[in-house]
Image: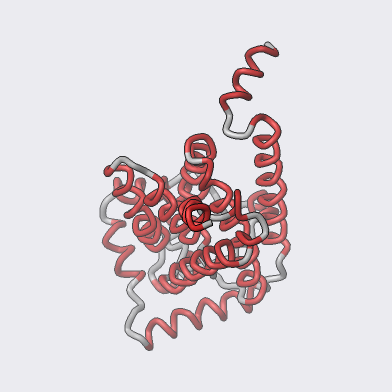
Amino acid sequence: MSATLARIGDWLPRGWRDLFLQVALYVVADNAYELSRGMAEGKASLAFANGERIMDFQRNTGTFFEPSAQSLVLNHQWLVDFANQVYLNSQFTVATAFLIWLYLFRNDAYYFVRNMLFVSMGLALVGYIGFPTAPPRMFPEYGFVDTINTFSSINHDSTLAQLFINPFAAVPSMHCAVSLMIGGAGFMVCRNRFARAFWFFWPILVAWVTIVTANHYWFDVAAGWAVAAAAFLIAARVLAHFKPETWAWSQVADHQRVRA
C-alpha cells in the first residue's frame, strides 16, 4: 500500500502534500462562502424591492425579455430538463471536474485559476450583502416559472437548503462568473479544437440556462461576468506579484522567464 501511495505521489504534479493543501483550501473557502452567503442579512422586503428595480430598469431599457425567453423553452420538456441539469451541475460538477483535470494535467495554470475563484467569491459576497435581490423565479405574477422546483426532484427553497444558501443571492450570478473563468481558462489551456470550442461556448450556454430557468436576470449575468473580469485582474495584477513562480498565469510566467 505504501509503495502504491508513493508511486501515486510521484505522479502527482507536486506530491500528496500539495494535493491535500488544495483540497483543504477549497473546503474552507467553500464552507465560509456558503455560510456567509446564507447568513447575509438580506431582508425579504428589500430583496423583492431590488428585484422590482432590476425589472423596471430592464423595462425602461427595452431589455426585459426573460419571460418571453422562458416561455419558448417551457413548450419543450426536453429543453427544460436539459436546462435544469446544466444549471444544477455547472457550478459544482463541471467546475470541479475541470479543476481536477487542470491540477493534474495543466498544473502551471491551476493556481492562477484557483486564486481567481477565491477572489470572485469575496467579490460576490459584497453584492449579496449590499444588494440582496429576489431572483425571477420568485415573481410568478410576471409569468416566471421556477423550473427547478416544478420540473425536477430538487427543492432549492427547502428549509435545509436555506440554512446554507441565501435565496436572495441573485446579483451577481456566480454560475455565470464561474463558467466564464473556467471557460476562458479551458479555452486557453486545451489543445483539442473540440474542447476549445466547448469551453468557448460554455459561458454562453450557462448564461442562457440561468435565464430560462428563472434563476437570474440578464443584469445578474452581466454582473457575474464583471466579477469574473475583476477577479482575473486582481489575480493577475495583485496576487501574482506575491508568488509569480506559481501564482502567475503560466504564459505570463513563461514570458517573464524568457525576458529575464
Q: Does 70 sit above or below residue 80?
A: below
Viewer-nearest residue: 146 or 221: 221
Residue 6, given in percent of the width and then of the height, sits at 66, 18
Residue at figure coordinates x 48%, y 53% from the top left:
258
Residue 197, given in percent of the width and then of the height, sits at 29, 49
Q: Is residue 193 left or right of residue 5?
A: left
Residue at figure coordinates x 56%, y 53% from the top left:
112
Residue 149 seen: no
Quadrant that contains the N terminus: top right
* Residue 8 in which image quadrant: top right
- Count all numbered tags in the image, as a single digit: 0
Residue 36, given in percent of the width and then of the height, sits at 71, 60
Viewer-nearest residue: 253 or 61: 253
Residue at figure coordinates x 42%, y 60% from the top left:
210
Q: Does 238 sit above or below residue 106?
A: below
Residue 95 seen: yes
Snapshot colouring: secondary structure
Residue 216, given in percent of the width and then of the height, sits at 46, 66
Q: Is residue 49 left or right of residue 180?
A: right
Residue at figure coordinates x 66%, y 52% from the top left:
159
Q: Does 78 sit above or below residue 207?
A: above
Q: Is residue 40 left or right of residue 170?
A: right
* Residue 133 in which image quadrant: bottom right
Q: Is residue 76 left or right of residue 141?
A: left
* Residue at the outermost bottom position: 60
